[in-house]
Image (cartoon, rainbow, N blue to C red):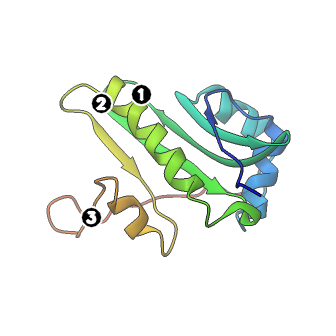
Amino acid sequence: MPSPTFKVIHTPPDKDDFIALRVAVGWQSIAPALVRRSMANTLHWSIIMRDEKLVAMGRVIGDSAMYFYVQDVVVHPDYQGQKLGRLIMEDIEKYLLSTCLPGATIGLMAAPGKTAFYEKFGYSARDGKAFGFGMCKFIDD
């Protein structure tokens, strides 16, 4: 039996599906109100559905001018190893190339062990010298 063909679409997923996919890959669950607000401010969606189930996603957030961030690139564990992450990133890269003007910066935070994946798309780890390592802060309850 031939393997199914996967197609990237550019509509936002259902918020519950978004939360469920994050949880399926071991990320924390997020309050629906926070997810709804975040999703509404997304610049670009790249998602893959299979039998009405969200199996892979990625999105771009930012200010639409100087700064863009690749966010939430995840593939459901049942579908990993089928190059869906690559499909998502190729689609995101097409969007960024058609949108970003010279001088724009594209950033992302790679999950542990995923740096090499993003390097294939031209991203490089910050070495701590010219630009520092980067930092983040989490707001808890």
**Callout 2: few (<14), some (14-19), or many (20+) C-alpha neighbours within 10 Å?**
few
Q: Residue furthest left?
A: 130
Q: Which residue is mark 1?
A: 63
Residue type at mark 3: give it: Arg
**Callout 1: few (<14), some (14-19), or many (20+) C-alpha neighbours within 10 Å?**
few
Q: Kindly identify which numbered label has been placed on residue 126.
A: 3
Q: Earlier in the sequence, mark 1 or mark 3?
A: 1
41 vs 117: above or below: above
**Callout 3: few (<14), some (14-19), or many (20+) C-alpha neighbours within 10 Å?**
few
Residue type at mark 1: give it: Asp
Label 1 secondary element: loop
| Quarter of the rendering occupied by the N terminus | bottom right
Q: Quadrant of residue 138?
A: bottom right
Given contact means CB atoms under 8 Å apart, are the residues at marks 1 and 2 in contact?
Answer: yes
Q: CA gap, disc 3 to disc 2? A: 19 Å
Q: Quadrant of residue 23?
A: bottom right
Pick whichever, 122 or 129, lies toward us: 122
Residue 79 in view (yes/no): yes
Q: Which residue is mark 2?
A: 66
Q: Position of residue 69 (x, y in %)?
A: 43, 42
Q: Position of residue 41 (x, y in %)?
A: 59, 27
Q: CA gap, disc 1 to disc 3? A: 22 Å
Label 2 secondary element: loop
Residue at image location 34% in from the left, 59% down from the top: 120
Q: Position of residue 25 (x, y in %)?
A: 71, 65
